[in-house]
Each structure stands twice: as C-alpha cells, then as structure tokens.
Image: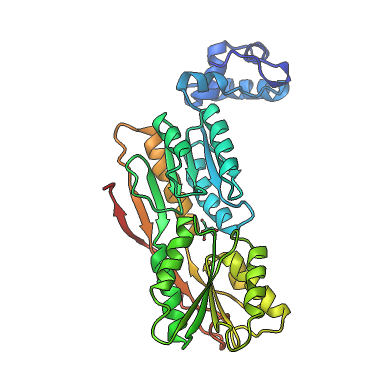
Amino acid sequence: MDASSERDGSSIKEVARQAGVSLGTVSNVLNRPEVVSEPTRQRVIEAIQKLGYVRNDSARQLRAGHSRTIAIVVLDVANPFFTDVVRGAEEAIDAAGAVAVVCNSGESAARERRHLDLLEEQRVKGVLITPVDDGRDSRLEQLVRRGTPVVLVDRGSGQRNRCSVAVDDVLGGQLAGAHLRELGHRRVAFVGGPIGIPQVADRRRGFAGIFPGDGEELRIVDTPNLSVAAGRRAGEEIADLPPADRPTAVFCANDLLALGVLQEMTLRGVRVPRDVAIVGYDDIDFAAAAAVPLSSIRQPREQLGRTAAQLLLEEANDPAHHEHRHVVFKPELVVRESTVRSPVPRRRARHAAISEVRPPP
Ligand code: RIB
C-alpha cells in the first residue's frame, strides 16, 4: 500500500475518501484488481481520475530493493541499429510489466561510467549494454558483483557472471570477403574503428582472413567512430588515391560508415559499384533505401534485443535458478546494387538462427 504523498497533492487517503472505500480497497485496485468487484473498482478509478492521483512507486521499490526499470545503454543513439535492438528489447520488457529507459554512451567510456553510477543509485532491475570497451570494464564488473544483472548486447563474452547476446562477427567479415572475392576484387579496403570495440576487431579479423591472398592488397582505413561523417572522411581518403592504387571494393564495419563512403564516392563522381563496390554491416533499413542500395551483412537486430531482455528478466526474476548463457546468432549476406550492378533478387538466406548457445567456460 502506497501511503506516501503523491503528485498533485492527492493521496491514497483522498482517493479512498472520494470513492467511499477503505485504503486497502484502493491498494487492491492498484495492485490486485482481480480481487475487487467491478462496481467498486470503477468507483475507485473514477476517484483516481477526478483527483489526478499518480502512484509513487518508491515505497514498493524500497520493499523490493529494486525498481521495475530496465536500462538499455547503447553506443550511439543516432545509429538505427540500436533503435531496432531497443525495439526488440522493449517488446520483452513491456510484456513483463517492466519499463525500459535508454542511455546513450556516445562511445565515451566516461559517459558510460556516469550512466552506470546513476543506474545503480536508481536500483534498476537490470542493465542491457553494448559496452564502449571489451566489457571487462571494472565498473561493469562492480555492478554485477553488487547484484545488478547485466547482459552484454551485440558483444560476445566468455565471462562467467553475466549473459551475452551477439552475432558471429568473424563470420560476418568472412562473408563480406568471400562475396567480394567471388566478384573478382583483388585490391580491397576495410573501413572501421575504433578497433577497441571487439565487434569491429572481429569483423576486420574475419575479412583479413580472406584478404589479402597472393597478389592481393588489403588497405586498412581507421576511423575515430562508427558514424556517417567518419565514413565520408574515409571515402575522401579512398577517392583521393591514384586510380592505380585505389581499392576496387570497400568493406565497412557498419552501415553508417558505408553510407558515408557511398555519399562521398557519389559526390566525387566515383561510380558504385563499377569503380568501387561497397559492403556495409547491420542491414539497417537505410541500407536498402540508399541511392545505390547497399549490400550488407545482416544482424538480427530486434532478435538480439529481445533475447538479451529475456535473459535479463529470467535472471532478475529468479537469480537462484538462472544459468548464464552466451547466445551467438549467425549473420547473413544481403546482396544489393552497391556490389552487383544488375539488380538481383535479394538473396535473403533463411532468418538468422541461433548458431550455438555457449555455457560459460
Ligand atoms: O556495436 C558496435 C557496432 O556494431 C555498432 O556501430 C552497430 O552498427 C553494430 O554493427
């Protein structure tokens, strides 16, 4: 029963008086409506609406030791990849009667740390996070040790004290490399950074496992972040190369970088894919909508978010029986006009399925 004073000055006592019922009946309407008769429930709801009463969850939160809030900490709130991940997570969080709040680290470790400090003070039910670094950050470790469930999103992990949901990014890099090699490319570039983000490092590693072979060249173009603007600067660097040195194909660590490279090539009259083919990563909606539809390595974005939220809720609701798991999805290659000139039926392989669920080592 929430006896504390509420917003607009109205309190649960005033609601009870207005409806002509006991405090316990008002509390039942709020917490166990199934035990209250319909006419009485309606009278209480009318009183709540008339008085503008808003329940203050702090009393329940103090009793339970945590709120019903689940935080989702993303690397870049402007990246549609995370919009889709959050959409999937929210679906599971809403269904569980909890609420999601999104925090943006902006790829800054300091901002991420500030968010984690505040979220712990708020006693959130749990944290879904794509960490700025390799996820072994001591602040994240401290949060877990002190009892806040954490699930890594879009990040593989071998850690024993938390779950993770990711895509096999090495395979993703290999898919991009094999596709470009199959098209006859021998002088290629990888655009991506910061390499401190493990997903980026894995994509690069998978791609580098394909290129360079004999008589082939692989140019690495590092970027300070994973944005369209960084892609444009990388595109400038590539377009300014003498034609004999310029790569004929570019694999980018995510679609925003790829859209930046595509924009720069288009502005400079470099034809895509005739002069330079481009492959992105994520397959966000803008990839297919680009002026030259983008070939991309598709991540099951909503599935990533939904699965991560389900793992977190399972742990938060029943920690004694929860077993940490590391879920790994397979990416898939989606071929479009940025690598293959003639429009091709979009080879959308079967939807990504969980390739393996790895228990902690
Ligand atoms: O999670 C890091 C990066 O991987 C994000 O930029 C997103 O695009 C995903 O591909």
For image coordinates 39% across by 82% down, the residue present is 213
Q: Residue furthest left?
A: 361
How many marks can you see?
0
Is residue 300 something that shows in the picture? no
Q: Please, is residue 44 above or below residue 217 in the view?
A: above
Locate residue 264, reporting x and y percent.
69, 75
Q: Is residue 44 left or right of residue 63?
A: right
199 and 316: which is toward the camera: 199
Q: Is residue 268 left or right of residue 184?
A: right
For image coordinates 48% across by 36% down, the residue present is 139
Which colour scheme appears in the figure? rainbow
217 and 332: which is toward the camera: 217
For image coordinates 51% across by 36% down, the residue present is 98
Figure quadrant of residue 22: top right
Is residue 55 something that shows in the picture? yes
Q: Is residue 232 left or right of residue 253?
A: right
Locate residue 76, reporting x and y percent.
60, 52
Figure quadrant of residue 260: bottom right
Locate residue 200, reporting x and y percent.
48, 61
Q: Is residue 62 left or right of residue 169?
A: right
Q: Please, is residue 168 above or below residue 164 in the view?
A: below
66 and 152: which is toward the camera: 152
Q: Please, is residue 135 above or below residue 204 in the view?
A: above
331 and 22: which is toward the camera: 331
